[in-house]
Image (cartoon, coloured by chain):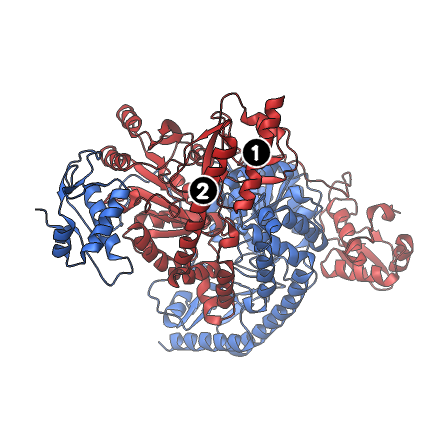
Chain colours: A blue, B red
Amino acid sequence: MLPYETIIRLDKGLKLPIYKQIAFSIIAAIQDGVLKSGTHLPGSRELAKMLNVHRKTVIAAYDELQSQDWIVVVPRKHVSVSDRIPILKPQKWNGQAVLNSYENDFLYPIKSVQKNVEICEGKRVPDLVIDDGRPDVRLSPIDQLLKMYRSNTSRNQSIRNAHVGTDQGTLRLRESLANYLYETRGLQISASNLLITHGAQMSIYLASKLVLDSRSNIIVAKPNYPIANSTFKEANATVLEVSVDDYGIDTDAIEILCREKKITAVYVIPHHHYPTTVTLSVERRIKLLALSKQYSFTIIEDDYDYDYHYASSPYLPLASSNHNGSVIYIGSFSKMLDPSLRIGFMVAPSNFIAQAVSLRRLIDVGGDGYMQNALATLIVDGELKRHLKKAKKTYHQRRDFLDTLLKEKLSDYISYRLPSGGMTIWIKLLPQYSICNLIQSSSLEILRIDEEQNAFRFGFASMNEKELEDAVSSLKSAIEKMSDK
Amino acid sequence: MLPYETIIRLDKGLKLPIYKQIAFSIIAAIQDGVLKSGTHLPGSRELAKMLNVHRKTVIAAYDELQSQDWIVVVPRKHVSVSDRIPILKPQKWNGQAVLNSYENDFLYPIKSVQKNVEICEGKRVPDLVIDDGRPDVRLSPIDQLLKMYRSNTSRNQSIRNAHVGTDQGTLRLRESLANYLYETRGLQISASNLLITHGAQMSIYLASKLVLDSRSNIIVAKPNYPIANSTFKEANATVLEVSVDDYGIDTDAIEILCREKKITAVYVIPHHHYPTTVTLSVERRIKLLALSKQYSFTIIEDDYDYDYHYASSPYLPLASSNHNGSVIYIGSFSKMLDPSLRIGFMVAPSNFIAQAVSLRRLIDVGGDGYMQNALATLIVDGELKRHLKKAKKTYHQRRDFLDTLLKEKLSDYISYRLPSGGMTIWIKLLPQYSICNLIQSSSLEILRIDEEQNAFRFGFASMNEKELEDAVSSLKSAIEKMSDK
C-alpha cells in the first residue's frame, strides 16, 4: 500500500474544499508517475479512514477524478488509475514544487535594462515619497470618467462598439483626439494618423522597433530618460549621446555627428526634458527640423509634458511643422489625468501607423474600448480642457510655492533652475553633499536620482502646499543630519 | 509685402481662438522658411485690417509669439521675426500638410501579420455580429469593479500604493491571484511567480521574446490561434505545425518532430483549443509533460478559457504538475469579466518572471494600479468566484440552447461537435456550401472564419436566447439564399 497520507496532503485552513485537495493530490501523483496506470486506489471507506475525512468527501473526489478520466470506478469492485494513461518512469514526488528556476535557455538577451528607479543600497520604509513628476490624481475628473465608462458598459450598442478597432484605438477617441490635438498643438491630422497605446512608453517601443535595427544610430540627450535608452538598445541600435544645456539638446553636436555617420533617428523631449526639465529653444527646434531634412533622419518627439507650460503657451510641437512625415510624435494622458490611466498616443504618417498597428496587435491585441470612449466623451464635452486649465493653474502655484520654500530653506545646499513648465524641479546638490548619502540618511524616498549629476527630480505637482512644506522640511533635516557626520 | 491673407488662414468655424490661429500660422511660416529672421511683420493695426479681425486679436497673437521668442516687438517701432532663428532655405509652403507617408526606411520587417479578423472581400454594415467567443458583459460585476476603482482613487494611501510595482503588477493583486490560482487550478505559486500583463497576448509576446530566436523551432497546432503564430514568427522562430483532432494537439506527431530536430517550445491551448474548441485529453497531457522533460522544451500553456468547462471540473493545468519550471502558464481576465478589461497574467519560475518584467518595462512601463487593486478586492471578496459560477451556469445553458437550435434549423447545412466547455461552437459548413459565399451574402458579420476549414466560430456566450434565435435565423436565411443561387 502506497503512503496515501503522504501523497494526499490536506490543509483544513485552506479555502479549497477538501474533496478538491484530495483530487488535486491524486492528479499530481498520477502526473508525476507515483500512481501508475492500473494502480488500484483504496476504496472510499478505507481512504476516508486513512485521511480522517467523511466518506462522502472521498466519493466526491473520486467522482471528480472519474469525470476527468483520471480514474476508472467499477462500482462495488475497485477504483483504479485509468489505463489510458501512458506509463511513465517514476520520479521523486515533490508535493511542494516551488517555481524558482526556469531551466531551459533564455534566448533573449536583456540588454542593460536599467532599473526603473535607481535606488542606492540600504533603504528603509519611507515616510514620504518624492515622485519624479506625477499629476495630483485628487484633482482629476475620475468620477466623470468612470461615469462615462459605466454608461458605456450598460448599453448594448456601446458594448458592441467598444470592441471595434481597439488595436488602433476606437474611432471615437481618435476622431476627438485629432480635433483636440489640432486645437491645442496645431497638428493637422486625421484619425488615420493616430494610434492609441497603453502609454508613452508603448509608443516609444513601437517606434523604436519600426525605425531601428542593429545598423542604426540614434542620438539622445545625456542625461536622458533611461527607459528610452534601454528601449533603443533593446532594438539593437547604437545610442549616441550629446549634451543638453539650458536650451535643450545640443543641435550643433547633432550636426557634427550627422557629418560623421549615418544617423537614423534623434529622440527629443522638447518640453521639460527628462530629467533636467529644460525646454528646447525655438532656434534649436528649427535647426533640428532642418537637419532632419538634410540628413533624412527620423525625429521621435516625446512631448509627454506639453500641457503644463507656465511661462507662455507651450511651443508648438516639431510635428506641427511641415516635415514630410519624418516626425513621430508621442503623447500620453497619464500626465494629464492619472498615471494609472494607461492611455497614450502616437501621431505619425498613416503608413507608419498601419505598420505600428500590425506590431501592436502582437503585443496586446488592443486597449480598453470603454475607457477610450469615456475619454473621448471627456474631450468632446470640454471636460479635459477645463481640467487641464485648472490643473495648470494649481501646478503653476505649486511650482512657485516650492521655489519659495527651496530658496528659504535649502539655498545653502542646492542649486536649481526654475523650469518654465512641467511637474518637476531638477535639483542639484552642492558638491560637498552626496545624493547617495542623502537618500541613505533620510526617511524620504526619492523616486528619481542621478548619481552622476548628484541630482534628483522633485515632483511638485502631486503635493499640496502642506505636503510640499513637509517634504522640504524632511529634506532639510536629512541634509543637516548628513552634514553633522 | 508678403501675402499675409494667404499665409494666415482663419476659420471662424473652428473652436481654436482666432488669435491662436494667427500665431500658429505665423509659426508655421517661420518654421517653413517663408518668414525669415529679421523679416518685419505688419503692425497690429495693419494686419487686423488685412485679416478683418479686431486689433486686440492681433495684439494677443503677437504677445503669444513674443512670449515664445518667435518674434521681437519694439513698441511703437516694429515687429520682426527673431534674429535668433537660423536662416533657412525657403521652401514651398503647404498649410495643409497631410501625413500620409513616412519616407525614411522601415527597418523593421513586419512578418506575415495576419489580420485580426480575416474577412473575405465585399462586406456591408452588419445587422448582427457573431463574435469568436466573448463573455456577456451584461452579466459581469462591472459596478462593483468601478466602485472599488473609485474608492482607490479617493484615498491618499491608495493613490500612493496604486503606483508601486505595476510593472510586475501590484502586490495585492499578485497575492490574491496566487491564492485564487491555487484554489481553482492547483497551482502552487507565490506572488513572485506572477506577472500581470495587459492580457493573454502580451504574455504570449513576452514569453515568445524570452524563449525564441532565429535558431528556435516552436510546435503549434494546425489550425492555431493566428496571432500566436504571427508572434512566434515575429520573434524569428520557425513555426512547425502538427494536426489537432478531437483529443487536442497530436502528441505522437510532436514526439516524431522531437526526434528529428531540436524543439525549443510547444504552444498549446489545452482547454477549448482555438479555433476548434477541443479539450486536450488526459493521456496527451501526460505525454506532453513527459516529452517536455525528455527533450527539454518549454511548454507555453495558453489556458485563456479554463473557467468555463461544463462536462466536469476543468482539467488541472499542465503548469500544476511537477514540471521543473518548464511550463509558462498564461491566463486572462478578459474572458472572465470583459474583453475590455485589459488584465491578464503569466505564471512562471521567478527568474523567468524577473526577465519578463525587465522586458515589459520597455513595452509599457506598467498597468493600471487602481484597476488591479479593484480586481484584487473582487477576488478576495469572493465576488469573482460568485460571478464565474453564475456565468458558467448561464453559458452552459446558452451552449445547450444553441445546440438545440442548430439541430433544429441548420442540420442540413453544417456539422459540429459540441464542445465540453468554452464560449464557442466551431461550426463546419458541409462541403457544398462555401463560408466565403456565406459571409458575402449575409448581413451577418462573423468575426472568425477559417476558409481552409470552411468553418467559423460561433460565440454563444455573449448572446441571450432571443439573440441566439435571431442569429441562427439570420444564418439559416443566408444559407438558403446562397443555395437558391
Res B246 quadrant in image: top left
Decide which of B316, A255 is in the foreground and name it.
B316
Q: Position of residue B375 (x, y in %)?
A: 44, 59
Decide which of B274, A301 is in the foreground and name it.
B274
> Earlier along the polypeptide chain: callout 1 or callout 2?
2
Mark seen at residue B350? none
Q: How many marks?
A: 2
Structural distance between the alpha carbons of marks 1 and 2: 17 Å
* Left-right relation of B362 to B245: right
* Left-right relation of B141 to A258: left
Q: Position of residue B483 (x, y in %)?
A: 59, 23
Q: In the figure, B32 relative to A130: above or below?
A: above
Asked whether residue A237 appears in the rendered view, the answer is: no
Residue linked to disc 1: B475
Q: What residue is drawn where x is 57% and y is 44%?
A: A266
Residue linked to disc 2: B399
Asked whether residue A26 appears in the rendered view, the answer is: yes
Res A54 quadrant in image: bottom left
Amino acid beneath label 1 = Leu
Amino acid beneath label 2 = Arg
* Left-right relation of A139 to A128: right
Q: What residue is drawn where x is 47% and y is 26%?
A: B453
Q: Chain of mark 2?
A: B
Q: What residue is drawn where x is 59% and y is 75%?
A: A401
* Crowding at mark 1 (Cα within 10 Å: few <14, some 14-19, many 20+): many
Q: What residue is drawn where x is 74% and y is 44%?
A: B32
Q: Position of residue B343 (x, y in %)?
A: 45, 52
Res B62 quadrant in image: bottom right
Q: Chain of mark 1?
A: B
Q: Position of residue A325 (x, y in %)?
A: 66, 39
